[in-house]
Each structure stands twice: as structure tokens, then as C-alpha cells.
Amino acid sequence: MAKSEKQRARQKPRVAGTANRGLKKGQGALKAGSAFTKSYAASKAGRTGPKGEKDVKSGKMTHMRTENTINRLNMYRDRTKALSKDQMTKPHRIQPDRRWFGNTRVIAQGKMQAFRETLSKGVEDPFSVVLKSSKLPMSLLKDVEEKSSRMNLLQVEPFKETFGKRRRQKRVKLGSYDLEGLMQSVSQKTQGYSTREGGDSKSIVDGLTGHDLTGEQHIKGHAGEEVFNKGTSKRIWAELYKVVDSSDVLLFVLDARDPMGTRIQKLEKEIRKTRPGKHIVLLLNKVDLIPTWCARRWVQILTKEFPTLAFHASITNPFGKNALLNLLRQFGVLIKERKHLTIGMIGYPNVGKSSVINTMRHKKVCKAAPIPGETKVWQYIALTKKLYMLDCPGIVPPTTYDFDADCAKVLRGVVRPERILDPSGYIDEVLSRVKRPYLL
């Protein structure tokens, strides 16, 4: 049944839709000529309520979202934006990554093997420097053999035998359990003790007769003197640790007359093992005291392990100063992480560590003398604006208390000859090392 004209007039006009078709603005049209209506979607920012409300939460309770909630949900839907150098002012999302929550990395076996081979060549080569070694997984280069697997104590000793009712109390292992056994063990050790057959090299009294050992008997079984303990005290080694910890490059100064004798190989191995970031350089000092062919041959031999330079410490007529300075500058360019490059001087007493620093500065800045033990504490000297040098007291590695070790210290100039009680006892060792034509 068709509607009359009065019924059509009573009906309310439509809010939006096809009746208007954009003929004029209003009644749902955004503008004149547009057929699109205003959106009341829950995800649209800046939308108003059906009755024109701007803030949907200001009045009564409603199910519609606020402006802040809409912006936050839209931020979640946006794609990740690339981070720029300038700080972003608007909120944005960053792509989540599982690496945020752990310090582990996953690498294929083939890539790890290639990394090991490539990096091991650079580490073993004395003329190459691995940059940013502190950020690289250097532990992958060597297999951990010393680390033992977790011990299963229950296999060694079951729980019932240890804490249960049937536990067994093990007897403590002692050398002797009564006084008679203790006296018997002491008498056996006394009978086996002999000072003449190398039982006690420091003894000056014969254990069998009780007489003093004099003359020829005292040559091989002499008593160690206090002067041979110079350079081995805890204070000196504490100064060494300060220099090692504060230095980026360690300069081991060797005496050209006895390079292997004045070389501290145990310290070199310990530094390479515990502090792989420290760079080691060997400096062959006092090359003016040996022939040229001999110095050239020693440089070739030592270069196979570490970079080696020949040097002659002298303020007026130096040798090798420019080569050493250029090498230190190269280290300064490679190690860009540090604003200053520190070079530590390490070596035996009386090898010329302080003289090398005076030569580099071209003036006397460190107290130097032709006698061992002149430097008492470590010294900090500025070579250039970026290069600093640390002078360290002479270090003597611990040795056995016998005649051969003390004789080696005397010939290397570690101790002062005037402080030795019996200096004539070491003349035979000098005559045995020097060829006969040079003595006549």
C-alpha cells in the first residue's frame, strides 16, 4: 500500500545515505559534491560521537575509545620505522629481537671454522694486529682442555654409604698414626740425607761429620747470599703488575750480549694467555757491544715470535730511534679506542730501560746508571701528546738456589759485584765461556 504525502512528511529525514548524494554540505556529507559520510570507526583519530561529542568519555559511561587509546593502538599497527641519527620526537615502534634477552649468538659450524682459521692466522702472525679484539669471541680460537667435566659424586661414593644408616667412616691418611711410626720415619729420612750428593745445595755444614764445608767442597754447595734476591721481592713485582695493567704495548728490553738469558719467557707466555689484548715488542739494546752480523742474526731469530728492533741507547748518537718511534705511532693509529697509547718498559736490571726512555726524549728524564737497581718505582713519562712511556724496575724471575743460577745472575749484571762476599768463586765460569784467543 502506497504511503500518503502526509505520512511521508511526518517521517524524520535520514542522517546520511543516498538521498543527499552530495548535493549540499550536511546531512552526512563531508562537503558539497561528496558522497562519503563521516566515519565513527573506533580506530579513527579525531572522530566524534554520533551526537557530535568530541570527548566520548566526558559524559556518561560509553563503550567508545578515547583519543589516546586510538593513537596508541594505531602506533602498534604501524610498521617499524628506520632509526635516524636525529632523535625521534614522535613515538614509534622498534622491531623486537630475541637477542635483546640473551648474550648468545648462533653460528653455523662451517662459518665458525672459517672464523677460527682466519683469525688464528692474524693472532699468530707477529706483524699483524687484530683490531677490536675485546669485542671478538677470542675464546673460540682455543679449545678448553683444562676445564674438567662435572664430577658425578654419586658414582664415586653412593649416598647410602655417606649419609645413610650404613655409612662408612673413612680413616684419615697420615704418614704415621703413632709416635713410634713418626720416629721411625724421621730416622729413615735422616739416614737418606746427604749434603755431598746434592741433598742440600745451600748447606755449609756437612750433615755426617758436622764440620764446615770449605774450599772445593763449598764451590758446588755454597750458601745463597742476600744480594741474589734483588729484583724478586713482592714490592718489585707489584710495580710490574701496575705497568702491565696500565700499558697497551709492552716493550721487553733485551741485552744484545745475552738476548735469551735476559728474556723473561714465562712472563711473555702469561701475558699472551691472560691478556691477549696487550701487544709485545722485543727491543735488542746495546747492539754497539756486539758485531753487526751477530745483531742482524739475533733480530732474524727473534722476529719469528715478536716484532724485534735493534737499538742503541744514546742521547747524542742513538741507533734505531726513528724505527721505534714509527712502530709506536703505528700502534697508536691502529688502537683508535684509546686517546693515549701507553708503552711499558719491562726487562732485567741493567739492560737499559731508563736509557731507552732518555734516548726517545733526547734528554735525561729518568735516572739512569751503569749499575743494577737504580730505578726503584715505576715512572710515567710523556713522549708525545699521544704516546706515554712507563719505566719499570728491573725484574728477575725466580730461580733455583744453586751455584749455576747465581753465577748466571752475576754474568748478566743483575747484582753488583762489589756486594758479593766471594767474587773470586765466579772467575772459573767466566774463563769457561770466553774463548782462549780473547784471553791472551
Image (tube, rainbow, N blue to C red):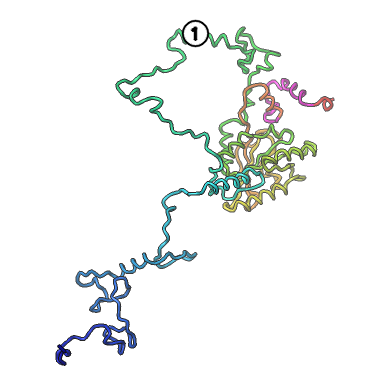
Give residue 289's position: percent from left, percent from top: 77, 36
Which residue: 64% across, 13% down? 197
Is 38 inside the magenta-drawn segment?
no
Give the amino acid type for the residue marked by disc 1 in the picture. Answer: Gln
Classify mark 1: helix, strand or loop. Answer: helix
Q: Is residue 273 toward the left or the right of residue 160 in the image?
A: right
Quadrant of the image for the N terminus? bottom left
Q: How many marks?
A: 1
**Left or right of 76 on screen, residue 210:** right
Q: Which residue is mark 1?
A: 184
Q: Is residue 368 visible?
A: no
Numbered range of the magenta stretch: 412-434
Q: Nearer the viewer, residue 2 or 136?
A: 2
Where does the image place residue 361, in percent across and percent down from the top left? 69, 48
- Where is residue 396 shown, x and y percent of the image? 63, 31
For image coordinates 41% across by 51% down, the residue present is 101
Look at the magenta stretch and give its main secondary structure.
helix
Image: 265 above or below 83? above
Q: Residue furthest front?
A: 1
Q: Classify 389 as above or below 230.
A: below
